[in-house]
Image (tube, rainbow, N blue to C red):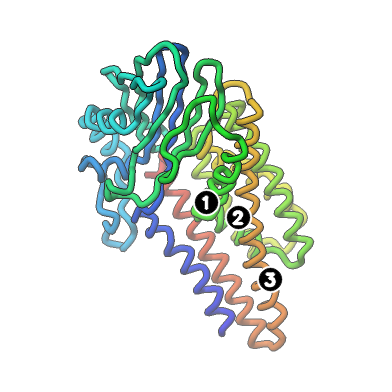
Amino acid sequence: MRLLAFLTALVVLLLAAAPAQAHVRATEVAIDLRGQGDGVAAVVDVEYDILARLLGLDGVLSPDAVGADGAAVEVPTEVRRSSLDAHASEAAGYVGERLRLSRGSIGCTAQEHARVELADSGAVQVALAYACPASGALTVRSDIFRASDGVVDETTTLVAYDVDGHRGSALLDTAHTSVTVGNTDLLSEIPQFIRLGAEHLLFGLDHVLFLLALLLGAKRLRDVVEVATAFTAAHSVTLVLAAIGWVSVPGWIVEPLIALSIAFVALDNLLSPRTSHRLPVVFGFGLLHGLGFAGALSVDGPPSASTLADLISFNVGIELAQLTIIAVAFPALLFLRRAATTPVAARALTLGTVAAAVAVAGAGLVWFVERSPLLT
């Protein structure tokens, strides 16, 4: 019974983290800069819910809002879009005020008529144009969603740029809020992108549950090595291809399929005693998860040494987080299996495994419905 309690508590803990994400503690902002000389264009992607709470917009509910069945309430996309359209000037004003560009000591001037829209990914996209001095290195400073705003504790900002012949990317955070284009230090960026990759996997509950579903079906260390290798190879390929723009699949297609992959693998552990098909399945689903990982990065223009280093570092962070999960979860599961030496313990192990698989599959199916635009 202790085995069953352990497995049930593990799944409940993970599932409980899903609604807790509504209490925003960290967020990501993406800034894409392009320009030459005195004209610079910026496209900024921010989370709708955070911007809505900050500006007091409609179309966002309290993080604790639940329906009659106790499930979190999802605000319809149409409500969000109409609210954003009605408050576009406020959204553009906030982002334009917090994103400041300058050449040398002379600040750039944000032009009027910014474009504000709700992207297919659900993020708010603000397009700004700046008039800058014609010469001098461009410095970018972002204070979008700083802690003093009271809606988020930490913001990581990815700046991708193609300005004055310089292409690359940089990460900004609370300690580093500005970057000068062309003056980024490659070695200093690597640890930040490794951290970003690790956080993206660890804080992505769907990716974590997919890995745990794979571990539930693994009997030997060799099984773990094989599925981990297949998953890593697959998501690394699509991560790079999607990040540099060679492959593009809309998020409304990718995210529901990622959720469905979780349910499939969890149920496959119960319904299929044979595992000969597991590696092709894991590889195929790994391609999907790679597209999901790439949502945190965007590289414009031909790959450079800097952008390739950023991509590799990001992927290394994902792998380190993945290995950490495997190193903690699989030995614990293996120990419990070997400890089940009596009929009672063996039955408890079977019941615990079934309960965990069903819970993970249920989470995947719920996310599939929530993320499918045709079903919501």
Which residue position holds label 1?
199
The foreground one among 324 and 307 is 307
Q: Secondary structure at mark 3?
A: helix
Q: Nearer the viewer, mark 1 or mark 3?
A: 1
Location of residue 270 with respect to 315 vertically, above or below: below
Q: Disc 3, disc 2: CB below 8 Å?
A: no
Which residue position holds label 3?
331
Q: Residue at x 40, y 24 (%)?
A: 42
Q: Work out whether mark 1 precedes mark 2 in sequence or the reverse, and give the earlier one.
A: 1
Q: Work out whether mark 3 precedes mark 2 in sequence or the reverse, and give the earlier one.
A: 2
Quadrant in which residue 211 is drawn = bottom right
Report the number of numbered marks: 3
* Residue 214 visible in rendering: yes
Q: Secondary structure at mark 1?
A: helix
Q: Disc 1, disc 2: CB below 8 Å?
A: yes
What amino acid does circle 1 point to? Glu
Q: Residues within 10 Å of mark 3 (few under 14, many from 20)?
A: few
Q: Quadrant of the C terminus?
A: top left
Q: Residues within 10 Å of mark 1 (few under 14, many from 20)?
A: some
Cα distance between the residues tagged 1 and 2 = 8 Å
Cα distance between the residues tagged 1 and 3 = 23 Å
What amino acid does circle 3 point to? Pro
Percent from the top left, x then y, of residue 356? 55, 68
Percent from the top left, x then y, of residue 343? 68, 87
Which residue position holds label 2?
321
Is residue 199 found left or right of 234 in the rendered image? left
